[in-house]
Amino acid sequence: MSLLGNVIWLIFGGFLAGLGYILGGLVLCLTIIGIPFGLQAIKLGIATMTPFGRKLVEDSNPNSTLKIVLNVAWLFFFGWEIALAHLFHAAILAITIIGLPFAKQHIKLLPLALFPFGRRFEPS
């Protein structure tokens, strides 16, 4: 199911969304200050390309002071917009029965979009 879900997800927009996150992350990596944020955007892009069959996992110390500061900066500059986009797409997809599994994947990406530092997607 996860392979078929990921293939359908990629065909109907997941590839373009993931590619956009990855390209945005590469642009952020051009500056020294943007490198940590660019790496998180690339991580979000990879997670966006294949969300089926994965789960969100916290690192060993996800709430260290530095990660909290970086998460607050991420939330202020990028996270709220990305999270609203995922929430909007989830609401649109949840209208139909066929779209419910895809809406669930958008909801699963919300925590990573809001606070990416100290969290990652792993195969479940």
Image (cartoon, rainbow, N blue to C red):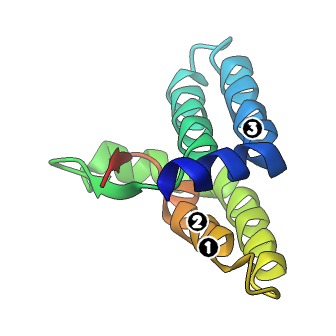
Q: Which mark is residue 15?
A: 3
Instruction: Give the side of residue 46 with respect to residue 80, left or right.
Output: left
Identify the mark nearer the N-term, 1 or 3: 3
**CB atoms of marks 1 and 2 within 8 Å:** yes
Please name whichever residue, 83 or 28, is drawn nearer the observer in this view of the structure. Answer: 83
Splitting the image into 4 quarters, where does residue 97 fall? Answer: bottom right
Could you tell me which secondary element the residue under label 3 belongs to?
A: helix
Q: Amino acid at mark 1?
A: Pro
Q: Amino acid at mark 2?
A: Gln
Q: Residues within 10 Å of mark 3 (few under 14, many from 20)?
A: some
Q: Amino acid at mark 3?
A: Phe
Instruction: Give the side of residue 53 with respect to residue 58, left or right.
Output: right
Q: Residue visible at 79% across and 44% down?
A: 11
Could you tell me which secondary element the residue under label 2 belongs to?
A: helix
Q: Residues within 10 Å of mark 1 (few under 14, many from 20)?
A: some
Camera-nearest label, 1 or 3:
1
Splitting the image into 4 quarters, where does residue 49 fall? Answer: top right
Instruction: Point out residue 25 in the picture as x, y percentages from the top left corner.
Output: 66, 27
**CB atoms of marks 1 and 3 within 8 Å:** no
Instruction: Point out residue 44 in the picture as x, y percentages from the top left corner.
Output: 57, 42
C-alpha separation, residue under disc 2 versus residue under disc 3: 14 Å
Q: Which residue is mark 1?
A: 101
Instruction: Give the side of residue 122 with respect to residue 52, left or right.
Output: left
Q: Residues within 10 Å of mark 2 (few under 14, many from 20)?
A: many
Instruction: Give the side of residue 26 with respect to residue 85, left or right.
Output: left
C-alpha separation, residue under disc 1 versus residue under disc 3: 17 Å
Instruction: Point out residue 77 in the picture as x, y percentages from the top left corner.
Output: 70, 49
Q: Which residue is mark 2?
A: 105
Could you tell me which secondary element the residue under label 1 belongs to?
A: helix
